[in-house]
Amino acid sequence: MTLDDAGAAPTVRGLPVFTSVSLEDAGAPRMRGLSVFSSEPLDDAGAAPSVRSLSVTSSEPLDDAGAAPSVQSLSVTSSEPLDDAGAAPSVRSLSGTSSEPLDDAGATPALRDAAELSSAVDPSAPVRLRVTPEARRAEAWALVLSARGLRPAVRWADGALELYVPSTEALAARRELAAADHEDAETRRAAIADAAIVDLPDSPHAALGGVLTALALLAFFWITGPAAGGAGWFSAGSSDAARVLAGEAWRGVTALTLHADATHVLSNIALGGVVVAGVMRWAGVGFGAALVLAAGTFGNLMNAWAYGDHHRSIGFSTAVFGAVGLLGALTYVRHRRRIRPSRPPWTALAGAIALLAALGASATSDLLAHMFGAIAGLALGLAVGWRGWRPATHGGQAVAGLVTAGVIGGAWALALA
């Protein structure tokens, strides 16, 4: 239904109205299509309806003269009626365009946030987002936006750097910068928290401990000789599964000090000297030696249990892979305690497993002994690492070292008795 030439409306008595209204140019906006829904009747005089809810949507710009828009599809919500003369509504709430009313003459509303809420504004117009006197910060902001495919620009004005983006990118740019600010705040918080974690200092004598371990293995090999010599050392000290299960648990210790030949002992020294020194760097020389001996011993005992009978093993390699497990676990715990570790904690455990697979599975090696040694080392390392067990004094380290030497000597005393 349309208004007549005088701008009047048909008289509707007490019925909801849905109509198309076309107002004249004089004193009213040039609306090409205006959809109206009203639950109130027109008055008896046929005046314009008192429109309580009017939905308007517009996608067209104002013309150069600032005249009212030629509205093809306009969606407005209003709580005010049209006046009796049929003039443009004083729109108090205009969805998507303006929070200011049209004036009585139907003039254009003042668009407060045209860059974000209306396509009527030039999309190439720059919007200033932030200002800082620090060049590094301005560059960081620009880098964040550029990485997201936006087009930032940094300008110098009034002694400060200003960050601009095209108006069409303003909302996205603000979101990206807010996310970057949040991440920076989390990073600073993590750095403060990590700095509060105090690790015991690394032992400065770890390399010396590795050398002493190598010398001890060479000394034992010089005393016992190779297995081919048929010396009684091997029958008394090898890890014989049947005898271990029968109660000779000391063989789990003595077997670590026996080697079949020079190649066997030298290969264990080459790898063992490095990983044992790594454990000693964290745990100290004396306590590190005790942990390596414990991992190797438990590995031999589990290996005997797994085989059950008819299996004999010798060599320090079980302790070497116990040291690999210890080193992986201790490194894991150190990184796991931090909010922002220098590397993912799981990589330490993955490295220990990879080393076991690469070096512990040769055709002539005792794979189960190596695996059980690594498992024992991982378990000990996790327990010691989480609890923070470690003698902090030279005296405590010395006691741990003497106990380790005493265990080896006592085991051989039982074996030769």
Image (tube, helix red, strand yellow):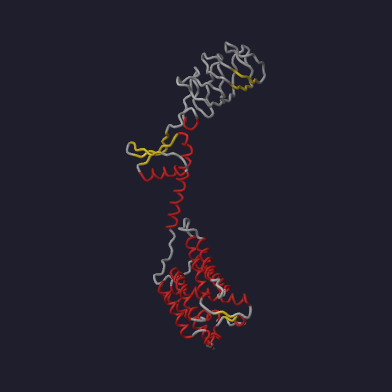
Instruction: Inspect this view and state whether residue 97 appears.
Output: yes
Q: Observer-nearest residue: 249 or 115?
A: 115
Q: Observer-nearest residue: 34 or 70?
A: 70
Quadrant (top left, top right, bottom left, bottom right) of the N terminus: top right
Residue 157 vs 314, above or below: the answer is above
Instruction: Inspect this view and state whether residue 287 appears.
Output: no
Give the quadrant of residue 219: bottom left
Give the quadrant of residue 297: bottom right
Q: Observer-nearest residue: 378 or 148?
A: 148
Q: Where is residue 278 in the image (x, y as percent from the top left)?
A: 45, 69
Quadrant (top left, top right, bottom left, bottom right) of the C terminus: bottom right
Q: Where is residue 316 in the image (x, y as percent from the top left)?
A: 51, 77
| Numbered marks: total | 0
Q: Where is residue 49 in the image (x, y as percent from the top left)?
A: 60, 17
Quick one: which residue is furthest to the left in this view?
A: 159
For the point 53% across and 65% down, the residue is 354
Residue 195 vs 71, above or below: the answer is below
Give the quadrant of residue 237: bottom right
For the point 47% across and 77% down, the residue is 266
Residue 318 vs 191, above or below: the answer is below
Q: Observer-nearest residue: 406 or 139?
A: 139
Q: Where is residue 242 in the image (x, y as percent from the top left)?
A: 62, 81
Q: In this view, does 296 lie to the left or right of 280?
A: right
Quick one: which residue is furthest to the front in this view?
A: 363
